[in-house]
Amino acid sequence: MAPPPHSSDAHRPSAVAVTYDTSDSAPRVVAKGYGTLAETIINTAREHGLYVHESPELVSLLMQVDLDAHIPPQLYVAIAELLAWLYELEGGEPVAKARV
């Protein structure tokens, strides 16, 4: 694991972009950063109509993942729940019903 963020990092905005393709074994971190870079990540996502989820705890954990690396198994459940919720939000069939 990476060392804790510097105290100055705690006061700057942070952002992590995660992507998932069904051909991948797990979601991957494709962008991350603090300050101006974080604002650029967020603005770019919004400009492309992508959902921006605000979870400081999850961002903190994802900031420890190397760029272009798959997320660790410890985060699978959290990310899977978020992806399932987004799928339903975007008009997909609710996950619970899809399994029936």
Image (cartoon, helix red, strand yellow):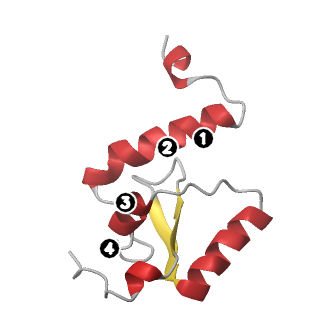
Q: How far separated are the C-alphas under marks 3 and 1?
A: 19 Å
- Single out the mark in the foreground, 3 or 4: 3
Name the residue carrying label 3.
57
Q: Residues within 10 Å of mark 1 (few under 14, many from 20)?
A: some
Vertically, is 84 above or below 14? Answer: above
Using the rendered view, name the quadrant where residue 37 is placed: bottom right
The answer to which of marks 3 and 1 sits earlier in the sequence is 3
Q: Secondary structure at mark 3?
A: helix
Tell me the amino acid under the disc marked 2: Leu
- Residue 82: which disc? 2
Tell me the amino acid under the disc marked 3: Glu
Tell me the amino acid under the disc marked 1: Leu
Q: How far separated are the C-alphas under marks 4 and 1?
A: 23 Å
Residue 33 x %, y %: 50, 81
The answer to which of marks 4 and 1 sits earlier in the sequence is 4
Q: How far separated are the C-alphas under marks 2 and 1?
A: 6 Å
Q: Secondary structure at mark 1?
A: helix
The answer to which of marks 3 and 4 sits earlier in the sequence is 3
User: Quadrant where the N terminus lies?
Assistant: bottom left
Using the rendered view, name the quadrant where residue 47 is placed: bottom right
The answer to which of marks 2 and 4 sits earlier in the sequence is 4
Q: Is residue 61 left or right of residue 93?
A: left
Name the residue carrying label 4.
64
Name the residue carrying label 1.
86
Tell me if label 2 and label 1 are in contact, CB under 8 Å. Answer: yes
Q: Is residue 67 left or right of residue 89?
A: left
The answer to which of marks 2 and 3 sits earlier in the sequence is 3
